[in-house]
Image (tube, helix red, strand yellow):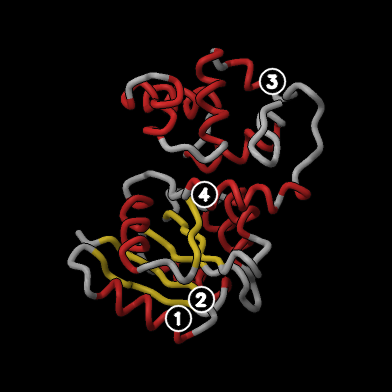
Amino acid sequence: MPIRVMLVDDQALLRTGFRMVLAAQPDMEVVAEAGDGVEALEQLRSTAVDVVLMDVRMPKLDGVETTSRICAQDDPPKVLILTTFDLDEYAFSGLKAGASGFMLKDVPPGELLAAIRSVHSGDAVVAPSTTRRLLDRFSPMLPSTGAQPQHKELERLTDREREVMVLVAQGLSNGEIAARLVLSEATVKTHVGRILTKLELRDRVQVVVLAYETGLVRAGGGTA
């Protein structure tokens, strides 16, 4: 069955461009479009969707609140935030609201398609370089922390798992973490899975958010 995609953007021209790219893929189908968050929520009541490509700045209901309401539903579709980055100050909030990742609107078509497939399969789309820049940019939004993280749930992690979590939060891929810690990539993947389970997190995006909010990692990539 093709991946069922909804396009949510107040710019009709952008939706047309995305629709043309997706329509050329044998494993994807655009099943719905919306020009704002209110319309998107209405469409989802009657249309089965796997992945939502979500704009952030829209009239009536912005992408952050729309994402939050979608992700609060039972068995919701995955949400992929699309942002202009330099002008958009809502991407971090979108991730906290439950989005499975974010990308720039001018992303090459191949990367966009790969991101949709990754999100649909249950992975999070977090480009390492963009993650570091984004979290540095939004550091003033995060609570100040002391020298030690105060989140009690982090006590569930072993020293190695905490070490892996720090590197995930700094934007490293599993392969990069494996090289840094002299581990196999499969071992790193196992550690990441255990972190998600112990902390009851959905994906790597939530790992990044929690690490910064608790002070395990500071903006700029340093550790607490």
As rendered, which of 87 and 49 lies closer to the eye?
87
Residue 152, numbered circle: 3
Residue at figure coordinates x 39%, y 26% from the top left: 178
Residue under pointer 1? 14
First of labels 2, 1 by sequence position: 2
Q: Which residue corresponds to mark 2?
A: 9
Q: Are marks 2 and 1 in contact (CB under 8 Å)?
A: yes
Residue tagged 4: 129
> Where 133 falls versus 220 (above or below)?
below
Going from the N terminus, do you reach mark 2 or mark 3 first?
Answer: 2
Mark 2 or mark 1, whichever is nearer to me? 1
Q: Dot 1 lies on which element?
A: helix
Residue 148: percent from left, percent from top: 75, 21
Q: Is residue 124 above or below residue 35?
A: above
Quote the CA–CA distance across marks 1 and 4: 25 Å
How far apart are the alpha carbons under marks 2 and 3? 39 Å
The N terminus lies in quadrant: bottom left
> Which of the two discs, 1 and 4, labels the residue nearer the N terminus?
1
Amino acid type at image mark 2: Asp
- Secondary structure at badge 4 equals helix
Which amino acid, mark 1? Leu
Question: In whole angstroms, how far apart are the C-alphas of marks 4 and 2?
Answer: 25 Å
| Tag 3: amino acid | Lys
